């Protein structure tokens, strides 16, 4: 198992424990580990050097604060430096005073330009803008077709040009005219992927830039890129003057070292991250969050946002009351499971929790059985309304019917009923004994829909 | 054959510049092997994405030889590294599996944007030039216009493409394609799959199912599972290869876009850590820019002018 950066740093910092002052000696081993860890996370070596120097300068001779261990103190310094490099604030998009504004998407082959173009368009619509798409990727087979299909999917207009039109300059000219005609305020231009060393294609981009006068040139970069990220970003920036970066495929397990590198060498802010294949798996880049994720502090902010997006507040409160009143039925149980599933794969959620980096390996690698959840929902779906409200009705015959109906076994049904009853018992204990006390109040305030015992975990 | 070697040289010129030139710069004018020199070497190798483990190994080897006075001169280090790289790469080589009866089934997998479809286009051209009959299977039913993209490659190579609608079950397309291949007595079927991140378990399970489907039609299939990787990928490439191997039994790697990167060192990291052979490397956009990988030749073209 490839040790992640956060694991590494945690281990290093553990070794730093128990010293009163940060000295060249006790820092050296740690800094060396940080250096290797950052290199393994694909941060460019020049950037690593800068970061290490900055941390060294800051940390050396510092009294370790009373409240912190030396390790924590170094974490704090590294975190501050990371945030500094990534940019303190979230960067905004610029638009022209007089519409239409033009946004050009550029980058290497396979970095995710076309998908990002569609996602950005959808995001812009949510911001109240009226984008129109155009693809000038006349090279990759079916690239223009791809954007057209995506445009149809997200219901945003696209300019596909006159039949047989194969010149990028003509295509964007047409898009501009169409934008004015249809009153669209932003033109998104998807360009062909190219290597930064491909002179001919770079000249083409230059020409498009001159013709379009874009307010934004976004460099689309794959989060998994290695040491090379720097070189291509640098070249694109020199040639075109990029104004921002879209970091794609961040839903993978890459630590995103490329983000640090690109930001440093171009000086241009990271503006968006791509987080999946769906058109709305796209969000503004948060420097502090990215730094926290790199340091293994967990992506709590994203987790909270995700939960509040997926969970219907009112329903959650109702559920909470039901729990307290001991009226929690199997049907409620199923609704809760469905809500949890809306949050996406459970393992991703677990990864966002702080402290996961410190968990023992077995715990971290424990598979949350998603199928188990599906099975439970199927079982409950196969019950009658009466059975859901009153599981005591479930005799042998009914259980058999449910098992057949849901494609499970009687044993599975038995298990579920048992789990459900145990959960109720536990809730009763909690709410009964302590309803008026501290815990009861605290629980009433908690709006997360998680039942306390969770099928599928820890089996 | 010499033209092949020339193309290989041209294609990995940047890797050469990034790796070997750096080693040479480090060694230039130095006679004595000291810890400074070794540190610089470590840097040169790591920044070429060779991978920390392999780099540590190489340096350990150098150190031991210095200690045992087997080498006393910095100029010998270059040859030592070269031999080490060849050893690592050759250790993973293994023969291509021949099917009991045609068709040979080749499954192409990888993360999004690695260059799977383009590789298939080039691979099909290569096989056809070798006199084999090829059938393509458009099992990327997810990405918009992926089927159309493969069809363009089919037309360019004059090869049939078995397809269904976008959104249909990829395993069903695989089933169709293999049945067709058997009926038409085709030599090779190449299956294009949708790009997926190795962390998405449900999508990896889908691949597993496709693999099982091939087995249902042809018991010893798939004969080859090629993981297509972007040559500019960093250390995350190892994790990719590991996960794809777990779920689909990857038998070899195709490394693409090597012409654009100075970091071909990842070739070594992958071979070393995963014990998987590199089957092909992509060094350009032309249809014949997919070259079979040969460890000796690859390293030779890195180290020789």
Image (cartoon, rainbow, N blue to C red):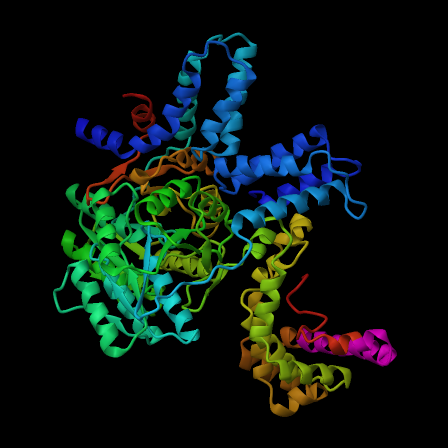
Q: Nearer the viewer, residue A416 or A442?
A: A442
Q: Nearer the viewer, residue B198 or A385?
A: B198
Outermost residue, front side: A97
Residue B179 seen in the current view: no
Name the residue at 60% across, 65% down. A303
Q: Which residues are magenta?
A: A414-441
Q: Which quadrant of the structure image shows residue A279?
A: bottom left
Q: Per the image, is B70 magenta?
A: no
Outermost residue, bottom side: A386
Total of numbered circles in the picture?
0
Percent across and percent down for residue A188 are 31, 65
Name the residue at 41% across, 46% down. B250
Image quadrant where one finds the N terminus of chain A: top right
Q: Main secondary structure of the magenta part?
A: helix
Q: Is residue A193 above or below residue A94?
A: above
Image quadrant where one finds the C terminus of chain A: bottom right
Percent across and percent down for residue B185 are 19, 54
Name the residue at 40% across, 16% down. B79
Q: Per the image, is A433 magenta?
A: yes
């Amino acid at each position: 198992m490839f040790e992640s950066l956060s694991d590494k740093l945690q281990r290093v910092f553990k070794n730093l424990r128990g010293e009163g002052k940060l000295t060249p000696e006790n820092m050296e081993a740690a800094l060396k580990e940080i250096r290797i860890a950052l290199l393994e996370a694909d941060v460019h070596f020049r950037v690593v050097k800068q970061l290490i120097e900055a941390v060294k300068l800051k940390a050396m001779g510092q009294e370790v604060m009373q409240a912190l261990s030396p390790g924590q103190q170094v974490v704090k310094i590294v975190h501050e430096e990371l945030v500094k490099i990534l940019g303190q604030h979230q960067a905004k998009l610029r638009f022209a005073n007089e519409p239409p504004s033009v946004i050009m998407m550029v980058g290497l082959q396979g970095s995710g330009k076309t998908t990002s173009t569609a996602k950005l368009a959808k995001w812009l619509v949510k911001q109240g803008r009226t984008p129109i798409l155009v693809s000038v990727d006349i090279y990759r087979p079916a690239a223009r077709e791809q954007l057209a299909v995506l445009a149809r999917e997200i219901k945003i207009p696209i300019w596909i040009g006159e039949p047989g039109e194969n010149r990028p300059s003509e295509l964007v000219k047409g898009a501009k005219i169409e934008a004015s005609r249809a009153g669209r305020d932003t033109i998104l231009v998807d360009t062909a992927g190219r290597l930064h060393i491909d002179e001919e294609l770079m000249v083409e981009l230059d020409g498009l830039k001159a013709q379009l006068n874009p307010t934004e040139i976004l460099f689309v970069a794959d989060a998994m890129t290695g040491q090379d990220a720097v070189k291509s970003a640098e070249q694109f920036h020199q040639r075109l003057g990029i104004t921002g970066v879209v970091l794609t495929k961040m839903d993978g397990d890459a630590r995103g070292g490329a983000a640090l590198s690109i930001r440093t060498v171009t000086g241009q802010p990271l503006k968006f991250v791509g987080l999946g294949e769906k058109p709305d798996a796209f969000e503004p880049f948060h420097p502090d969050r990215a730094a926290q994720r790199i340091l293994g502090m967990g992506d709590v902010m994203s987790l909270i946002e995700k939960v509040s997006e997926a969970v219907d507040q009112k329903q959650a409160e109702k559920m909470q009351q039901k729990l307290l009143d001991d009226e929690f039925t199997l049907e409620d149980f199923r609704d809760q499971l469905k809500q949890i599933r809306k949050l996406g794969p459970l393992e991703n959620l677990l990864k966002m929790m702080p402290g996961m980096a410190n968990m023992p390996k077995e715990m971290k690698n424990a598979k949350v059985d998603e199928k188990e959840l599906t099975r439970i929902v199927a079982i409950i779906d196969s019950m009658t309304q009466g059975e859901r409200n009153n599981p005591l009705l479930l005799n042998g015959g009914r259980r058999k019917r449910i098992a057949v109906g849901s494609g499970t076994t009687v044993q599975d049904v038995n298990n579920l009923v048992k789990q459900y009853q145990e959960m109720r018992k536990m809730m009763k204990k909690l709410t009964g004994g302590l309803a008026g006390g501290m815990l009861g109040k605290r629980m009433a305030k908690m709006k997360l829909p998680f039942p306390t015992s969770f099928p599928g975990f820890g089996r | 054959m010499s033209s092949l070697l020339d193309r290989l040289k041209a294609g990995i010129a940047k890797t050469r510049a990034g790796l070997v030139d750096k080693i040479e710069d480090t060694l230039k004018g130095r006679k004595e092997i000291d810890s400074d020199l070794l540190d610089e070497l470590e840097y040169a190798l790591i920044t070429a994405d060779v991978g920390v483990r392999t780099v540590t190994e190489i340096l350990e080897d150098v150190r031991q030889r210095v200690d045992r006075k087997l080498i006393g001169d910095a100029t010998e280090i270059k040859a030592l590294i070269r031999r080490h790289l060849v050893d690592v790469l050759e250790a993973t080589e293994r023969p291509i599996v021949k099917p009991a009866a045609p068709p040979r089934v080749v499954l192409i997998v990888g993360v999004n944007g690695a260059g799977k479809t383009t590789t298939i286009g080039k691979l099909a051209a290569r096989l056809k030039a070798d006199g084999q009959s090829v059938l393509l299977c458009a099992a990327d039913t997810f990405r918009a216009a992926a089927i159309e993209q493969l069809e363009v490659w089919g037309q360019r190579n004059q090869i049939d493409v078995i397809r269904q609608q976008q959104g249909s079950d990829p395993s069903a397309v695989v089933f169709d394609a293999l049945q067709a291949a058997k009926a038409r007595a085709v030599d090779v079927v190449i299956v294009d799959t949708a790009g997926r991140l190795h962390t998405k378990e449900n999508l990896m399970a889908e691949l597993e199912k496709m693999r099982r489907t091939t087995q249902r039609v042809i018991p010893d299939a798939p004969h080859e599972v090629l993981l297509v990787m972007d040559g500019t990928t960093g250390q995350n490439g190892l994790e990719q290869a590991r996960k794809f191997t777990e779920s689909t039994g990857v038998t070899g790697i195709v490394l693409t876009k090597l012409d654009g990167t100075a970091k071909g060192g990842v070739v070594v990291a992958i071979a070393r850590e995963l014990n998987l052979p590199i089957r092909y490397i992509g060094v350009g956009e032309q249809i014949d820019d997919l070259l079979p990988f040969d460890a000796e030749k690859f390293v030779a073209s890195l180290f020789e002018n």
